[in-house]
Image (tube, rainbow, N blue to C red):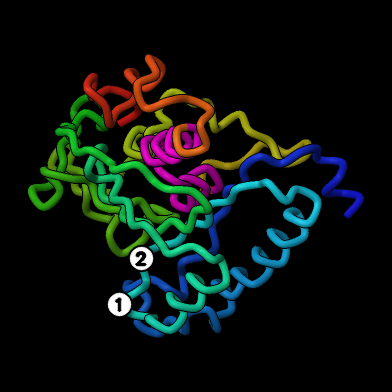
Amino acid sequence: EARIRGLGVFDLLVCGFSCQDMSDANRQGRGLQGSKSMVFFAAMKILRAIRQLNPAMDHVLECTDFEAKHGRDWQHVNLVTGTPAVNLEAGDVARGWRKRAFWGRFAMLPLQKREVDPSSALLHGRELMPRWKKKVPTITTHAGSWNMTRVVKQDGKVGPLLLQEVKNVMGYGTVDLESAKVGDRKVTSKEVWRGLGNSIHASVLCHMMVSWLVTRGYITRDDVRLNGQCWTINQDGPL
């Protein structure tokens, strides 16, 4: 409790829980009983502790869409969070696919589609493989993942995206993630990639934050500050 108080007042808490045991890609996944995705229960314990000190706080939990594979767990998360999930597909506004479920304590505004050229994420002289001409595959936590190994062709050779390209796909291309530190230690490239593979796409994160600001009345639906967001008339914002 003392540590939570030391962090100050919480208006909004955003967190995700591990998708490894929930994902369709893991045929042996045990859902919330899995050794990794069971971190959900720890996340809820932390959420309840913070809310005791911040009763007006809003929250958003994020994970992959696991309703079809783990229906009971899906209903359990809906029940425990007190909020039915909303699915948002980053591919509707960005260069790559990334369908994720969000359990928010506020209403999500509709995510309006826009056309984005996925090849704009690549560095010079590199070309997407035919399978990924329309959208880059969902970014996972490392280059050797099953869907990451044959994405780009360069000089006749096929391989994964480069780290800068992963940043571009996830909408964090201009952010200097490589200079981040854990204590006194600088993060490695593998750790940056892992973080991106576990992150919320920048466009969806922006959309989520504006949804929160609008539905809570901090800004109105006709506010000029909405005009610069990718889901409005301008169709700009992070890709």
**Residue positioned 88% across, 55% down in the render:** 1
Q: Tell me, for residue 65, which label it has, or none.
A: 2
**Structural crowding at the residue carrying mark 1, measured as other residues with C-alpha within 10 Å and reported as few (<14), some (14–19) or many (≥20):** few
* Camera sees residue 155: yes
- The magenta segment: 191-213
Q: For mark 1, what is the residue? A: 68
Q: Is 192 one of the magenta-colored residues?
A: yes
User: Hey, what amino acid is under mark 2?
Assistant: Asp
Q: Tell me, for residue 187, which label it has, or none.
A: none
> Where is residue 38 shown, x and y percent of the image?
59, 75
> Where is residue 11 shown, x and y percent of the image?
66, 39
Q: Is 181 one of the magenta-colored residues?
A: no
Looking at the picture, tell me which residue is in the foreground, 74 or 217: 217
Please give left or right for residue 92 compared with residue 104 in the image: left
Is the residue under label 1 in contact with that under label 2 (CB below 8 Å)? yes
- Identify the image quadrant of residue 235: top left
